[in-house]
Image: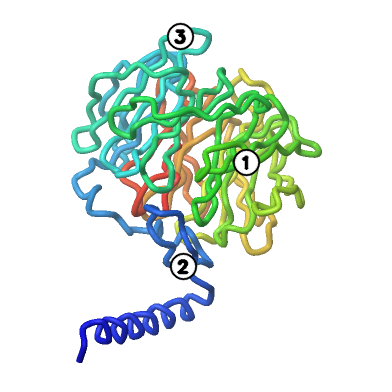
Amino acid sequence: MPHHHHRRLLSVALGCLLGLAGARAGAQTIETVPGMPPVPNPANLYSETAAGKLAAAVADALPRAYVPNRQSNDVYVIDTTTLKVVDKFKVGINPQHVVPSWDLKTLWVTNNAEGRTDGSLTPIDPKTGKPGKSIAVDDPYNMYFSPDGRSAIVVAEALKRLDLRDPETMALQSSIATPQCAGINHADFAIDGRFAIFTCEFQKGLVKVDLVERKVLGYLTLSKGGMPQDIRVSPDGAVFYVADMHADGVFVVDGASFKEIGIIPTGVAPHGLYPSRDGTRLYVANRGTHAIRGKPKGKGTVAVIDFATRKVETTWPIPGGGSPDMGNVSVDGKQLWLSGRFDDVVYVIDTASGAVTKIPVGKEPHGLALWPQPGRYSLGHTGNMR
């Protein structure tokens, strides 16, 4: 039999197998951008971040929560098994978020040095829990990674731009200016990796960015929007949920048409958004105050949105008041960890009962990262895993 005929038979057989797999998933295959890992289940892009699905790259990672304290310029390290603070170390000026790298091997602390010019990124080795030498980087308020892993996307908030950098050395590759997006800060990505939507905190809207052509596709002003914060894509990739601190709710935005299609009231000042491990719910951290620098013991709660109905199914109060901000879900999905921004604590919330445990940390804790996290790769922020 000629070789080419052999190859064709093989490819037909493979195609049949892949077709069966696609049919079982109940949806068409998603054609991702080159270099981006495939989407195994188009109905749930969070399928690979399910409880316990840990990659080989995180096998030796210590079970820790890394808490950046914006005012005390340090990171507290909490052992997630004992809930005890086991270490703390100084980093750069105004650490905002702890960001897992695309390859899951490094955690980056984004120190944006507000109002100054000495911003930096501090690497942490998750196998030892210790920091390395900081790298000078312009205004790194937040950081994401391109779905193909080729670029770190540093969100230079004060400069209204995205800086694409080498994901290891942080050498500048190129920049995307976002002049009509004051306060650019949080993002999430299309199911196929072709675009990202970033929130514009001080411009009451969003910006859509083409990640292939590396250019702005357009801006959207939210109807009752005042201060959009975190953003998360739905499991099927169709819509994006946008927490808005002034609208006291989460906007629903169609990703393809880039149009607002609704709002879900959630509580006072929604800020952080985290999908549950089974991909059925979205946890909404309501910070409890519209002020950027709030007081302790605010009206903080956590609302739980059902992805299927787009309704709040339950709301958990913070006993005695509080300010839940940013964090993530534990490996097994049984806990939601959030920083208490104006209360100088971390909340560990039982996702079955809503019971809250508080752990004292440094001054003004912000974007804490739990590590390890399930998933094949990280798109950044505090563990936007896929």
Marks 2 and 1 sit apart, C-alpha to C-alpha, by 24 Å
Estimate the x, y position of residue 250 in percent, counting from the top left. Answer: 69, 44
Marks 3 and 2 sit apart, C-alpha to C-alpha, by 44 Å
Placement of 102 over or under 193, stated as above or below: above
Residue occupied by mark 2: 41
Viewer-side label of 1, 3: 1
Q: Amino acid at mark 3?
A: Thr
Residue ID at (19%, 33%): 128
Residue occupied by mark 1: 208
Estimate the x, y position of residue 167 in percent, counting from the top left. Answer: 33, 34
Numbered disc 1: secondary structure: strand
Question: How dense is the environment of label 1, judged by Cα within 10 Å: few (below 14), some, or many (20 and up)?
Answer: many
Residue ID at (41%, 15%): 119
Asked whether the beta carbons under mark 1 and mark 3 sit within 8 Å of each other, the answer is no
Residue ID at (62%, 41%): 208
Q: From the viewer's perspective, tell me whether residue 109 is left or right of residue 311.
A: left
Asked whether the beta carbons under mark 2 and mark 1 sit within 8 Å of each other, the answer is no
Q: Amino acid at mark 2?
A: Asn
Numbered disc 2: secondary structure: loop
Question: How dense is the environment of label 2, judged by Cα within 10 Å: few (below 14), some, or many (20 and up)?
Answer: many
Placement of 54 over or under 113, stated as above or below: below
Question: How dense is the environment of label 3, judged by Cα within 10 Å: few (below 14), some, or many (20 and up)?
Answer: few
Image quadrant assignment for residue 109: top left
Marks 1 and 3 sit apart, C-alpha to C-alpha, by 27 Å
Residue 117 numbered mark, or none: 3
